Image (cartoon, rainbow, N blue to C red):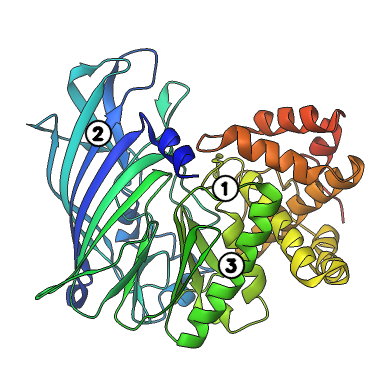
Amino acid sequence: EIERLLAASQGLDEIIIDATLQPEAASLSVTQTLTLTNREPAALTELALRLYPNAFRSEETSPAATEELHSLCYPNGFSEGGGTMQTLSVNGKKASFTYGDAQNTLLRIPLTDEWLAGGTVSVTAEYTLQLPQASHRFGFSGGVFTLGNAFLIPAVYEDGAYRSDPYSSIGDPFYSQCANYHVTLRVPKGYECGASAYAAAEERADGSVYRFEALAARDFALCVSNGYHAAQETRSGVLLTAYALTGQNADKLLSIAAQAMDVYQKRFGPYPYPSFTLCEVDFPFGGMEYPGFVMVGGATLATDEAERTIAHETAHQWWYAVVGSDQINLPWQDEALCEYSVLAFVQDTQGSAAREEFYRRQIEFAMREHIAKGITPGSPIDYFITLSEYATVVYDRGAALLDAIDKASGGKMDEVLRAYYEQYAFKIASRQDFERVLTEVTGQDLLPLMTDYLDTYLEN
């Protein structure tokens, strides 16, 4: 798999991050260099980056401050977060930028020289991140610093423009191409870090230094705490590490993730990264996926949902991390596949009766629920009002589609997913790409079934 990863990493954008955490100030000083290639057929006169932490600046713009989430994510009241840019340069020359969205997460940088097709530009930024006191993917809470969608990342260029989707409260409102990440993190003594790659801490007199390499990764996220217990094992050549606030939780995270990895590697194809890391965090969601890395809510770990959540988030390594899709407009394309993967996990670890029970309780129930007019599993994330409605429709009704395809094709869904994984690894797949693989593998026209489940409103 290392050869495959090295091959996939050739010619990708290079992102170098050097960051220092100041825990008492809940801030991170960052120097970042992005070497970007223009993959469009024509020259570009501007480049755009996303800095999602800026959304956390105010209650009006924070994805954690909606009516549904505010009291859960800000139990001590609203706390401000965001980024402050100190210096920005392009190819060594001072550059300016303007914000291109209401949340100030889209940085538009005009280029003094045309960015030729196939040419590269080097952007260097020095900035400071302020973490809000918030139980969210970006913040600090319960002794853990969560750094999800924290760093500058290239905006996706599509159909002649940079994507400027809002960083909203429902679903995973971000979307990116794979790049090679080289990350150095400096933390005080006693702090441990789990991330999208694995690195042993280099202990120094004044603290620890972590040096991470994540090749062909769609993003880079990390968690830091001075209260972590670690559990670790190597499974099929992959280093699995779990960090949690108790030794018991670390063991639980590790054992469930290891089982899930076994199931998915066997069914869908080999996991390509050298490591997979899980961190316990304090937030009101079940979990949050990033390439090579998963955050799991401590509250969820204590419930019956722990197994399903860890299995779902682990499945995202196949559907989102390796095979990318537009999570904003087509959230079913990773979420439904992950929830269907959970059915496979339950089948392989607990047997057919347990799968049937899970299907009945979770998926059949979702098919019977009343949902607001016009909302279907194929809807974009901005159609949804609540997280529970989103999960019911996109995860569960989406999984019902894949189960229906499996039945209609005489049990070929795994084969479809294997081919899809093989063909679209490290790329972005569209709905049409998925449908093409489906038709190719099954030899049947199952597109009416896709339309029926994804695009048709279910009257209940």
Q: CA distance from mark 2 to mark 3?
A: 35 Å
**Alpha-carbon span between mark 1 and mark 3:** 34 Å
Q: Nearer the viewer, mark 1 or mark 3?
A: 3
**In the picture provided, is 29 more to the left or to the right than 191?**
left
Is any atom of residue 336 visible in this view? Answer: no
Q: Place residue 389 in its image quadrant.
A: bottom right
Q: Residues within 10 Å of mark 3 (few under 14, many from 20)?
A: many
Residue at 24% x, 38% y: name it: 34
* Distance in Å between CA atoms under marks 1 and 2: 32 Å
In terms of depth relative to the viewer, which is nearer, 292 or 152?
292
Q: Amino acid at mark 2?
A: Thr
- The reply to whether dot 1 and dot 2 touch (C-beta < 8 Å) is no
Mark 2 vs 3: CB contact within 8 A: no
The answer to whether residue 88 of the structure is visible from this angle is yes
Question: Would you identify the image quadrant in which residue 333 lies?
Answer: top right
Q: In the rendered image, which quarter contains the C terminus?
A: bottom right
Reply above or below: 341 against 330: below
Q: Please give the residue where the numbered disc 2 appears in the rendered image.
A: 35
Give the amino acid at mark 1. Answer: Asp
- Among numbered discs 1 and 3, the one appearing first in the sequence: 3
Secondary structure beneath disc 1?
helix
* Closer to the eye: label 2 or 3: 3
Q: Along the horizontal axis of the image, is 254 left or right of 39?
A: right
Image coordinates of residue 290 in percent, x first then y, are 46, 55
Label 3, on which residue?
Answer: 258
| Count of numbered tags | 3
- Residue designated by label 1: 382
Residue at image coords 61%, 72%: 256
Q: Residue at x 16, y 40 (%)?
A: 124
Front position in the image: 61 or 338: 338
